[in-house]
Amino acid sequence: EKAAEWVNALKLYSVMAQQQVKSNAITFSAAISACEKGGEWEKALWLLKMFAHTEVTSSTSIRPAIMHNAAISACEKSNEWENALLLFSAMELDGVEPDTISFNAAISACEKGGEWKKALQILRLLVQREVEPDRITYSSMISACEKGHQWENALQMFKAMAENEVESNTVTFNAAISACEKGGEWEKALNLVSMMAQRE
């Protein structure tokens, strides 16, 4: 079904181009999002490039970052973390301000690529830009630290989550517990298990 979505989206785009129907931001966004869901990161990048070099009709009903976010997510889901970060870095060059979803997708790409240091750099940039982190931000950061055997950083993220009044869930608890386990910090792991049990 997901594969059919991006195939149909590209067919529709092709028909529109052949019939010289003007595409708009919503058209491109829908096609890129379909590619993201289908894991077709290369096609998502191609569409984003096409959008940048095509005269499109303006639309006020779509957020400027949405197409970039979908393309970054397509790379992230395909474990193309380097391409995801290139896209993220290029946003400002394209005159697009990264939002929370942009940062989350970039951090998640680093997490999947085992690049916890780069994930931390992106988080610092998020703080500098005064972009609001959410549960996904912290969950991805904790997972990145856990995969990088950085239990102290993972617990710092977990603590920052509470300080910023972002509610933790099973995913964040499990990632933090796993980080402590990998670091041989079994007492801290047991404390987290106890905290999780009290919340349920």
Image (cartoon, rainbow, N blue to C red):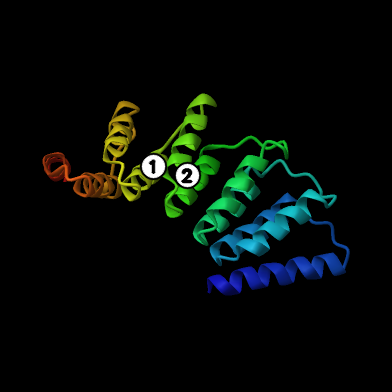
**At x 27% / y 41%, what residue is drawn?**
151
Residue 169 at x, y percent in the picture: 28, 45
Dot 1 lies on which element?
A: helix
Q: In the image, residue 119 lies at what x, y percent? A: 46, 41
* Residue that mark 1 sits on: 141
Could you tell me which residue is drawn at 38 percent across and 46 percent down?
144
Q: Is residue 21 visible?
A: yes
Rendered position, 8 above or below 160: below
Mark 1: amino acid:
Met
> Which image quadrant is residue 43 in?
bottom right
Front position in the image: 83 or 46? 83
Percent coordinates x, y for residue 100 in the rendering: 51, 38
Give the side of residue 171 with respect to residue 192, left or right: right
Could you tell me which residue is drawn at 32 percent across and 36 percent down?
A: 153
Q: In the figure, is residue 182 to the left or right of 74?
A: left
Mark yes or no: residue 64 visible: no
**Residue at the disc numbered 2:** 107
Amino acid type at mark 2 = Ile
Q: Earlier in the sequence, mark 2 or mark 1?
A: 2
Q: Which residue is pictured at 52% across the width and 40% down the height?
A: 103
**Residues at badges 2 and 1 in contact (C-beta under 8 Å)?**
yes
> Circle 1: is it few (<14), some (14-19), or many (20+) Cα within 10 Å?
many
